Image (cartoon, rainbow, N blue to C red):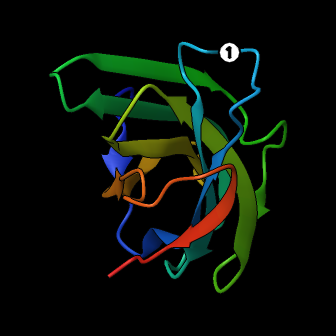
Amino acid sequence: MSTQSKELYGLRATLDRLVYFHDSEAVDSDAPHTFIYFITIANLSNTTVTLNGRRWIIKGEDGHQNVFEGEGIVGKSPTLAPGESFSYNSHHTAEGNCTAEGSFHGIDSAGDPIHARIPTFEMTIPSESSDGQTELDLT
């Protein structure tokens, strides 16, 4: 088994939807902006994969960077045969505008470590931000 992860051709992560939420009465005043993301991971490769971790890099406009790594994807380790997909949603909180990118990690059917990149996306606070939820344009 190889020890270095390779990007698996055909394993793709897609941002399906991004929602901004603001609650002026939120307890966490350091990061009052919430971005809820909906992602689909599609296995268009010719091998079965099991995804067992993720890594997110959140970069603020001020240059500050946070890295989040962990086991599972929303508490699951999905196994995807060729042609199958896994969809989920989660969120990031932020002080202001930022970008998110990262990767999902796992193994292929031969037990070799693989990963799929999460394309960079902007998390921009709407100019007319008020309490409540706003769907953000992905284009």
Horizontal arrangement in the rendering, residue 122 relative to residue 15 (left or right): left
Q: Is residue 2 visible in this depiction of the protein?
A: no
Tell me if residue 36 comes above or below residue 27 in the rendering. below
Q: Nearer the viewer, residue 125 or 116?
A: 125
Q: Nearer the viewer, residue 116 or 101?
A: 101
Q: Which residue is mark 1?
A: 28
Q: Nearer the viewer, residue 88 or 111?
A: 88
Report the residue at 83% width, 43% height from top: 76
Horizontal arrangement in the rendering, residue 17 relative to residue 55 (left or right): right
Quadrant for residue 56, please give it: top left
How many numbered markers are drawn? Answer: 1
Tell me if residue 124 comes above or below residue 98 in the rendering. below
Report the residue at 73% width, 68% height from top: 86
x and y percentages locating residue 103 in the rendered image: 43, 44
Quadrant for residue 72, please give it: top right
Name, please, the residue furthest toward the right.
75
Report the residue at 68% width, 15% height from top: 28
Q: Nearer the viewer, residue 105 or 129?
A: 129
x and y percentages locating residue 135 in the rendered image: 58, 72
Report the residue at 61% width, 66% height from top: 134
Horizontal arrangement in the rendering, residue 137 relative to residue 97 (left or right): right
